[in-house]
Amino acid sequence: MSTEEPKTVEDDFDFLGDIEAPVTIAAAPRVLEDECGNTAFKFCFVGLGQAGGRMVEAFWKLGYRRVAAINTAHQDLDTLDIPKENQLLLTGTDGLDGAGKDMTRAKEIADQGRERILDHLLKCGFDANFDRVLVCLGTGGGTGGGTSVTVLEVIHELLESMQATSRVKVGVMASLPATSEGRRVCANACECLDHLLKSAATGRGREAVRAISPLILVDNSRISKLYPGVSAGSFWASANSTIARMFHLYNKTAATVSSHTSFDSRDYQDVLDSGLITFGSCNMASWENPTDISDAIRQHLASNVLVANTDLRSASVAGCVFIGSERVMDQVPQDHLEQGFKMLDRMMGGGSTVHRGVYSLGPRNSLTAYTILGGLNAPVETTAALAKHGEWWPSLPGAVKPAPVDHPPQREDVAESGT
């Protein structure tokens, strides 16, 4: 009779101790905190392509730290002044850099790299403790517009896995090319813009959860007119910095208590949730007369927003923040500011809401009105011009395909002679 004890399952795996495995060093969790002071909302920024990368670089320089840049060309990433760990290079199976203005190629590359995109977003702080996501891109290139659909899907899937879709909203800041940039660029912009405008529309159920808000359009041809005389070397850095600073200003003031009138976080949220938005500013040359401020807003606001020919009358909600030094605010009569608020309300049309803010800030002896408007209709003239130049007709607002021209039949003798 055997005295040996029967073998157990554990005994069958007693060789495990002899298998050498590399030591796994657990990475310390990356705790990200913005360095831009107190703000109403904690934003995550995702830059797609060259234009998008430049946009998020401007937000990084302001102190926002949940920033990710994604590109298919390493040259574009190399020029960005943001940490390398915040940059993701996606390449196709052919190993070649860039999308070459080909949105189809860019989308295929993004689809192949969905898991890498997800991991990159998590690494850049898109895992907890944020309120909104803003995806920045240029609509005319290949990478920005081509990867946008996939990246937006990945972001929404991430939010759904975090059960954060009811809390976190996803918006887009998209630059529109000038028609002088070429037909293919304009056609790319039309295709990308068509998708963005449809995604910004109000829907129900899953469609509503994945709706884009805000959608901020930046017209490159308008920007070049707003900043005349700036050198080519510093133009985009200057323009992107100014746009980012204005956006940041609303986020800062919405978290700042005013001794006059506060533009609070609920006011700002109301605008950000309204779909298509734009913003601009207006410096007041004087404020002695009751109509000085209202006249300045009426004459200059429409020419200072980000897209030309924006129909401000279609806006349903706005925030108007007056900022001046303490010395200025001691001089400006309250009813003069009221005239400015009322003028904006009249410009927007019936049924609109104007959220107000008045702040004594800054050392300058000036008064500026910063205005952000939401719930706008698509800029028809701008989209129509892009569609016409890019010969893109499916459904973009204002895009009307020209009727074919009937040419009279050519006489055979003229055709043969060529005269």
Image (cartoon, rainbow, N blue to C red):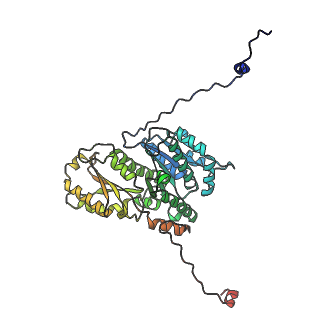
**In the rendering, at what x and y percent does residue 233 appear?**
49, 52
**In the rendering, at what x and y percent does residue 47 appear?**
51, 48
Residue 260 located left or right of residue 388:
left
Q: Quadrant of the N terminus?
A: top right
* Residue at the far front in the pictured view: 1
Q: Quadrant of the C terminus?
A: bottom right
**In the rendering, at what x and y percent does residue 216 appear?**
44, 55
Q: Residue at x 40, y 59 (%)?
A: 226
Q: Is residue 151 above or below residue 408?
A: above
Q: For residue 375, which quarter of the picture?
A: bottom left
Residue 143 located left or right of residue 339:
right
Q: Residue at x 76, y 11 (%)?
A: 4
Q: For residue 392, which quarter of the picture?
A: bottom right
Q: Give the camera-side residue of 332 and 209.
A: 209
* Residue at the far right in the pictured view: 1
Residue 232 located left or right of residue 40:
right
**In the rendering, at what x and y percent does residue 380 appear?**
45, 66
Q: Is residue 360 above or below residue 388?
A: above
Whether residue 211 is visible here, answered yes or no, is no
Whether residue 259 is visible here, answered yes or no, is yes
